[in-house]
Image (spheres, rainbow, N blue to C red):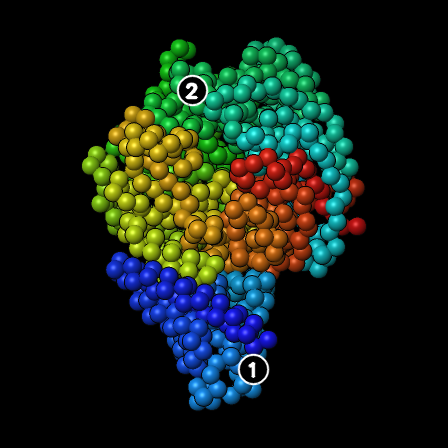
Amino acid sequence: MNNSRNIVVTIIGAALLLLGLGLAAGGAYLISLGGSWFYLPAGLAMAASGLGLIRQKGWALYVAWALLIVSLIWAFSEVGTDFWQLVPRTVTFLVVALLVTLSAPTLRKADLGRVISCKLAAGVSAVLAIGIIAIFAGMFRPHPEVEATADKVPVLDEKAADDSGNDWTAYGRNTGGQRFAQFDQINTTNVKDLKVAWTYHTGDLAINGSEYQTTPLKVGNTMYVCTPLNKVIALDPVTGKEKWRFDPKIEETSGNKTWKRCRGVAYTELSEAPQDGTQPAIAGNKRIISTTNDGRIFSLDAETGKLDESFGDKGFVNLLNGLGPTAHGSYYLTSAPLAADGVVMVGGKLNDNLTTGEASGVVRGYDSRSGKLLWAWDASRGAKDSTPLPEGEIYPIETPNFWGTAAYDAKLGIAYFPTGNQTPDFWTGNRHPYSDEYNDSVVAVELKTGKEVWHFRTANQDQFDYDVSSQPILYDMPGKDGTVTPVLIQLTKRGQVFVLDRRTGKPVVEVEQRKVSTDAMPGMKVAETQPYSAISVGTKALKESDMWGASIFDQLYCRVQFKEMRWEGEFTPLSDKKRTLIYPGYYGGFNWGGGAIDVSTGTLIVNDIRMAQWGQFIKREDADARGLQATTEGEYSEQLGTPWGVERGMFISPLGVPCFKPPFGSMTAIDLATGKTRWQVPMGTIKDAPIHGVAPGLDIPLGMPTMGGPLVTKGGLTFFHGSLDYYVRALDNNTGKELWRGRLPVGGQGAPMTYIGEDGKQYIVVVAGGATRTGTNDNRGDDVIAYALP
């Protein structure tokens, strides 16, 4: 028995010796890079403790406990009480101390007597074990970054949105993109009783590059939902039964072959009779306007689903007209169009990072009855002219495009849309002056004419694909003096929240220009300063101590990688010499999903992504030699027409976990009046998020990257289902605490919506087709799910 025990202890000692030496070696290298001095002596102490076990020396306990004490002092001094940062810094050394303490009976009695008695060793082992268990238990509860300080948020407008009806008539519920509903039938006291009311399957599984990112509409007694193949389906909102469906039969192109989305459709009512006296092709004035992945707009009778053949060319408008030969296969639409006041307004998505010479990013307005082109705003002309070009002429190539959904203020007659930048995204040496002027901007135009009113840049020069993609949120913000300012809230991938007067584009919340790194490659154009808002989420610059990992070993690896990379803060330019850290990453911050505003309390509620990436310029011949495959968003893009290709990737450890501290996605409530964060909670667990292809299956609320957006109701609830785990959740608007969750068959990416049905019930609806970009056809779906109270 003793021999077996001694063998086990020897094996433990050998493992600690080897691991300690590895930690020490990595620590020595980190010191050579100018990093922390902790890992070298900690590794040596671990190795010494292991050696002591092998030699059955009692001093192994001294070393193990000293290592634990020093590591605790170091951990708390470096990261304070941040739970998730403490975990990799402490658990390993707790386990080392526990193993060595449990090995005490095998150590030489003469030495052991001078160290500790066996009974005391057993007691210490129990304490250490309890500590480890407590940390493990702590992993299963959320750790908010900002705890709510008040149980109740003050109500500024008790009648907010009371006159907005029972429907959901636009992508963001209204053309202001607020995603707020005044319904309170489902509230904080009864949300726990929510049940599935009905489920509908569209028949189009989210496979082969298709993703469900849609938010349905509900108008009257009909719900409208679109599939990634741009089929439009009408459902009974009370029963979920299909009424009709329309298939535009999209063409599969090189651009949309692996990228098919439909984030929403638009609803409009044709209020004017045809000007030429002709009769419309179909009776009635209610229309569903939608777009396609192959670059078309089409109009349907909202009651019957029949194609309105008086719109455009037999029901369709070809958006490739005027874009030139490079548009086919590169230009397509993914987001819901804006349809209001007789105008349909659309932009389009272009392939990123493949080549120069991509088609124009022109934004166009069409007559919602006839499909006639009314105006065309293009960055090359800007505020000078929005008159459509004559038939046969081509809009200037390479202008910044708008690929999200616009917002509209009917009182002002102004539409607002965000822009991206001139592609390729990571090389700025070929940018046109007008591209620099309008990159990553919010542009305000008259909806009827397309004439520019103002524009505001959220970045002075974009080298990292920081396209502004989320729908602007329009809100009438009350002031302390009783005045009301009509504002526009623009979320950005940079995590900056710009609050502007939507009449003039002037900041309402302070914006300052800060100096950024300009150490760029020859030929690159970079800005010396960038705009920063007084309100932001997840934007604090990373430092070495923010590096994270599942253990002390991959945390050390991440610290080494961090020190090896170029990093002088946000906007550190890419180089060909070594990798550059990109943070915030080019997925966000805030992506296309946008946010929501509780207009009754003036609280902005947003979900974000916190994922760092890295990038490096590479010669195309070197990339070919390494067998890198060129794609628009993968690990390598050619950027033809520029001097360099670009290689990039996620900043993760060998274990497949991010190299920086959690959360990697959160939900945040911001008081717009003060700019202060009311609460901030991690969003999502690791349960269904695969690591090297294996889902952990654990409800650990680490906070994972999010997609889609939130829904806020006057019932005091925020609903969300864009996390990487398969849940729809309801959070308390006052505290951010989770009050209810419903298990989904697969993950979701869109935004929930709500309405009151003809049966008088409030419904919450989500569309679940699978979590974002899994890279496989596993765990894919086509579910439209409605929830209601029993």
Comes first in the chain, label 1 or label 2: 1
Specify few, some or many for label 2: CA neighbours under 10 Å numbering under 14, 14-19, or 20 or more.
Answer: many
Residue 352 at what x, y percent from top left? 40, 31
Q: Tell me which corner region of the image, top left, top right, bottom left or bottom right, holds residue 123.
A: bottom right
- Label for residue 180? none
- Which of discs 1 and 2 lies nearer the camera? The answer is 1
Residue on which disc 1 sits: 122
Distance in Å between CA atoms under marks 1 and 2:
73 Å
Specify few, some or many for label 1: CA neighbours under 10 Å numbering under 14, 14-19, or 20 or more.
Answer: some
Amino acid under label 1?
Ala
- Label for residue 327? 2
In the image, residue 200 sits, relative to residue 672, either above or below, namely above
In this figure, what is the number of numbered marks? 2
Residue at image position (40%, 42%) is 649
Residue at image position (40%, 37%) is 635
Of 115 and 395, nearer the camera is 115
Of 229 and 44, nearer the camera is 44
Residue 91 at what x, y percent from top left? 49, 68
Amino acid under label 2?
Ala
